[in-house]
Image (cartoon, grey):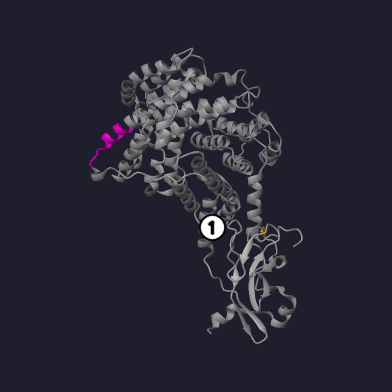
Amino acid sequence: MSETESARWVRAAARTDLDLEGCRVVHLNGHTLALFAHNGVVHAVDNRCPHMGFPLSRGTVGDCILTCHWHHARFDLRSGGTFDPWADDVRAFPVEIRGDEIWVDLAPRRDPLEHQRERLREGLEREIPLVLAKAAIALTEGGVDPAQPFREGLEFGVHHRRGGWGQGLTIHACMMNLIPHLDPEERPRAVYHGLSAVARDSAGMAPRFGLRPLPGGSASPESLERWLRRFVEVRDAEGAERCIVTAVRAGADAASVAAMLFAAATDHRYIQTGHVLDFINKAMEALDWAGWDAAESALSSLATGLAHAERMEESSAWRHPVDLVDILERAFEQLPAALATGSRRRDRAEAESRRGAARESLVEVLLGDDPRAIAEGLLAELREGCTPAELAGIVAGAAALRIARFHTSNEFGDWDRALHTFTFANAVHQGLRRTDSPALVRGVFDAAMSVYLDRFLNIPAAALPEPAADADPEWLLRELPLILDRQQQVNEAGALAASFLDSGGDPARLRAALGAMLLREDRDFHTIQAVEAAFRQQGLAGDSASGRVALIAAARYLAGHAPTVRAQAQTFQIARRLHRGDHLFEGD
Ligand code: FES
């Protein structure tokens, strides 16, 4: 036996003592082991039940199965393997009998990070939130880049949900986007929420079998985009999917594939109240984290949603009493010329200064009640040299204002309307920062019309908080959780966010605080979307008035949907305490 090997072996107890007692707890080099004498054989296992830490020495052994007495998880006493996957295997230690002495080998037998990766997959497959929380904590606190578990969740989600990309994967991508805004101790919580959302969305679903690309690889990118749009037009999801897969396999770059997807998503008006375009944007953002080599399965999972979406041409609100679709179609006829004129003017300095003033008046038009003036105002801005991405940012700002001025006398469900418009407007904005697709510019107009349709949500309009520069930002951060412990503190939360910023508080700290408040609540798809989009908009707008509005909107939306039961936070807290070695069982 080598010196290192002998150092791993430790004397644990006298055999005669254990035979008398049947079970004994020993503390060895920082480990607490339960020794069992069963059927003439000595076994040693970690005394903490891997489920929630109950002392296994208080369990029962029968037929070489150890049963924990808290939630009755069962373990093979020899190997430590569990018969209850929600509990995890307990670590079993090799034992040697030397004369009357029991020796155990404390050397690690498995790579703890690799074990947690396996557990993560098991948690996804069986939808076990506690397992996912444990894996998220162990991996991220073990130094693993959150992009790794993120990719695991992404691949699981796109293969295990027959209906394709849905809320779970969107939450997953939102959580990954939120991570850079969060304090380090909150980041595992975001990983956990994302993975759990994917697991829940896939639970009980048939798997999705992706289509292969067209053989030969001879189809041109132009043909594939044209075919994709044609197949979406006739709601043919499989035809659409084959075009997407073929484009990716042929080596199309991210911007080109994004352009064809966004074009197909804007051939009809504001499809599926904006969700489909938002999903495309989130899929592209997910690939920014996970890597483009995951594109084929991730993007093909969007085809069903694209093909089967409800189109607002089919909705009464977009046709009566004003035919918004007709207004938009006429505006779209003028788009190529407006873009060409704007591109010629863009570099002129005087155009830049004129545009600044014009944009302020455009916001007033966007929040007004004349849809023709809105369409004309957007075209005029493009002609003056405003880039499509800039214009999309202005419309997203107007959509954020709808939330910042949402009156609490509205029905609770009306928050959703304002949210749909805002997330759609943000997705169009992010899409146009990714690709200069002229077709996607139509999405800016759709978003503007949705802002128009939401105008009743601001009648009466809640006043934006007055500038208040004499507050203590640190005190406000301590106050935020207390406010969000109470129901319907919408205006109070908005005022707090405004005071924090007006008093010189760092927006990054406010984002981190709001992110932490979001994560302590149970997952609500729309609240997650609202906060994530607001952070994105604030990040782009910086210290401007638009940035202030974005964070006011985030605080108000969050307050409108808090507090929840916080069951998911409880699960996470249990996992964190177990990871830290805290005792959960009071009698331990
Ligand atoms: S089964 Fe052992 S603590 Fe839950």
Q: Residue furthest top?
A: 321
Question: How far across and down, in percent of the image, does residue 265 sit?
Answer: 39, 30
Question: How far across and down, in percent of the image, does residue 417 sit?
Answer: 55, 26
Q: Is residue 104 magenta?
A: no
Question: How far across and down, in percent of the image, does residue 206 sit?
Answer: 47, 45
Q: Residue furthest right?
A: 587
- Identify the magenta region: 218-228
Q: Is residue 255 above or below residue 451?
A: below
Q: Is there any visible trace of residue 404 in the rendered image?
A: no
Residue 418 picture quarter? top right
**Residue type at mark 1?**
Arg
Question: How far across and down, in percent of the image, does residue 30 sit?
Answer: 66, 70
**Mark 1 residue element:** helix
Q: Foreground: 138 or 145?
A: 138
- How many numbered marks have been drawn onto this rendered protein structure? 1
- The local crowd at label 1, few if under 14, some if 14 to 19, many if 20 or more residues have their Cα within 10 Å, is many
Q: Is residue 221 magenta?
A: yes
Q: Is residue 382 above or below residue 219?
A: above
Which residue, given by chain and number where applicable, does mark 1 sit on? 119
Left or right, residue 393 beside residue 6: left
What's the magenta bit mostly, secondary-structure-wise?
A: helix
- Check the picture and name the quadrant holding the C terminus: bottom right
Figure quarter occupied by ligand 1: bottom right
Q: Is mark 1 within 8 Å of ligand 1?
A: no
Q: Foreground: 433 or 196?
A: 196
Q: Is there any visible trace of residue 228 in the rendered image?
A: yes
